[in-house]
Image: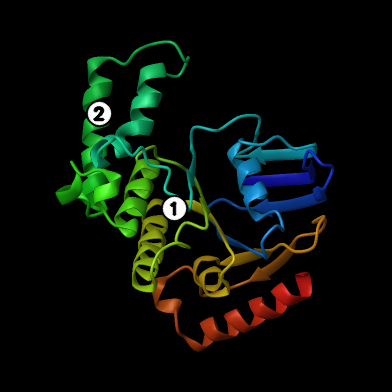
Amino acid sequence: MIEIDGLTFRYPDGTAVFDGFSWRVAAGEAWAVLGPSGCGKTTLLYLLAGLRAASGGSLRLAGEPVVRPRPRTGLILQDFGLLPWATVQDNVALGLRIRGFYGPDGKHAPAGEAVTATRQITLAWIDRLGLAPLARSFPSQISGGQRQRTAIARTLALDPDLLLMDEPFAALDAPTREDLQNLTLRLRAERGLNTLVVTHTIEEAALLGEQVLVLGRLPNRAPRIVPNPGAGVPEFRGTPAYVRACTRLRQELEAAR
């Protein structure tokens, strides 16, 4: 699914974040990306999303080079990215409306059938994520967890095959964070999604990543990969294997600094 060969990326000031970095992710895998602040976690996510361009090397998704944002790559951010003047329903429908309005060739307005389909898909995801009572509410009127559910619904409505998440639960309280972690795991299992979750939290990486990529000192050259069998299901949390995974990830993170 993800093929990175000899990736190089430098910030405008010349700081090298990746230098000859190569990495593979097979279809259907769930990964977490763990590392300290400033190690390139979000940069890697934005490169995969087509929002930043590599300085060198190659980056391919599903066999195609990444040169711009890809229709089936979903991106969920920590700050939700919701329009404050739009209702929950309109925020969930936003991506579908943009895609329908421009069409595959970027020119044609949607046919009536596309408008109807957009509404049906939007309402289905609002219901699936428990947002139906809040459909006409604005982001300022709902909780942080409900705003993140809205962002997840908006992204999944576009039927992605790759879901990129940048510290999506960092600003939430512990019970809400666990609830949305469990939701993410269930949705991934139901839809067979590739997921890539960026986090600075060891416990979250141990739960969500069946494999964990640990980034560290710049520039990142060789991937440090930690297999994490048993992860990827809510029941893994709190088990002896989970505790061992947290311990190993803590050691790997210290070694990578």
Residue 117 numbered tag? 2
| Residue at image location 62% in from the left, 40% down from the top | 61
Residue 192 numbered tag? 1
Pinpoint residue 89: horizontal percent, then vertical percent.
Answer: 24, 39
| Residue at image location 58% in from the left, 80% down from the top | 246
Depth check, front residue: 66 or 256? 256
Above or below: residue 229 compared with residue 8: below
Q: How many marks?
A: 2
- Residue extending furthest toward the bottom: 240
Depth check, front residue: 99 or 199? 199
| Residue at image location 56% in from the left, 67% down from the top | 210
Above or below: residue 210 compared with residue 193: below
Q: Amino acid at mark 2?
A: Ala
| Residue at image location 58% in from the left, 40% down from the top | 49
Pinpoint residue 169: horizontal percent, then vertical percent.
Answer: 44, 61
> In the image, is 95 to the left or to the right of 1?
left
Pinpoint residue 38: horizontal percent, then vertical percent.
Answer: 70, 57
Depth check, front residue: 146 or 99? 146
| Disc 1 from disc 2: Cα separation | 23 Å
Above or below: residue 105 compared with residue 5: above
Q: Check disc 2 and report its element: helix, strand or loop.
A: helix
